Image: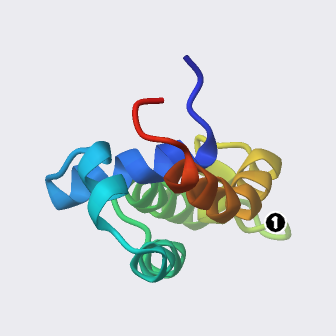
């Protein structure tokens, strides 16, 4: 089974709220899900946020030791997810989340 970006977001949200994906699908309105999606886009939580923190530490260490005239590292240079994949994932996540909620129960 391959989870779509929307499914992954639902699982992330369920984990954060201490609920199951089925409970979210049954009890969360479209507007509330959109609000959670926007909140996550602005303030990500979980492994993505942890990855950012690790990237900040790594980029700081690199930057204090870099040679003069070389490009400063950013936290994105140390992210585990490829930038191109991350951009595509962000664009698809919202639409796929809505599709995941619209699927018939039991799929």
Image location of residue 7, percent across then percent down: 51, 43
Image location of residue 31, percent across then percent down: 47, 83
Outermost left residue? 18
Q: Please tell me which residue is depicted at 63% across the width and 65% down the height of the picture.
A: 94
Q: Nearer the viewer, residue 55 or 83?
A: 83
Toward which corner of the image does residue 69 lie, by quadrant? bottom right
* Above or below, comparing residue 101 to residue 71 in the picture: above
Image location of residue 76, percent across then percent down: 65, 59
Toward which corner of the image does residue 28 lie, by quadrant? bottom left
Q: Please tell me which residue is depicted at 19% across the width and 61% down the height of the picture.
A: 17
Q: Please tell me which residue is depicted at 39% across the width and 74% down the height of the picture.
A: 29
Q: Residues within 10 Å of mark 1 (few under 14, many from 20)?
A: few
Query: Is residue 47 among what the camera can see?
Result: no
Q: Answer with left or right where residue 65 lies relative to residue 88.
A: left
Q: Please tell me which residue is depicted at 30% across the width and 44% down the height of the picture.
A: 22
Question: Circle 1 sits on which residue?
Answer: 71
Image location of residue 5, percent across then percent down: 61, 46
Outermost front residue? 104
Query: Is residue 51 among what the camera can see?
Result: yes
- Quadrant (top left/top right/bottom left/bottom right) for the N terminus: top right
Toward which corner of the image does residue 49 lie, by quadrant? bottom left
Q: Answer with left or right where residue 99 lies relative to residue 51.
A: right
Outermost top residue? 1
């Amino acid at each position: 089974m391959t989870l779509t970006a929307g499914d992954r977001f639902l699982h992330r949200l369920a984990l954060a709220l201490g609920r199951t994906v089925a409970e979210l699908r049954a009890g969360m309105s479209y507007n509330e899900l959109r609000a959670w999606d926007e909140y996550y886009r602005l303030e990500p939580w979980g492994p993505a946020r942890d990855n950012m923190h690790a990237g900040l530490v790594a980029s700081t260490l690199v930057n204090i030791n870099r040679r003069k005239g070389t490009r400063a590292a950013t936290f994105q240079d140390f992210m585990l997810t490829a930038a191109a994949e991350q951009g595509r994932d962000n664009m698809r996540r919202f639409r796929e989340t809505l599709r995941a909620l619209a699927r018939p129960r039991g799929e």
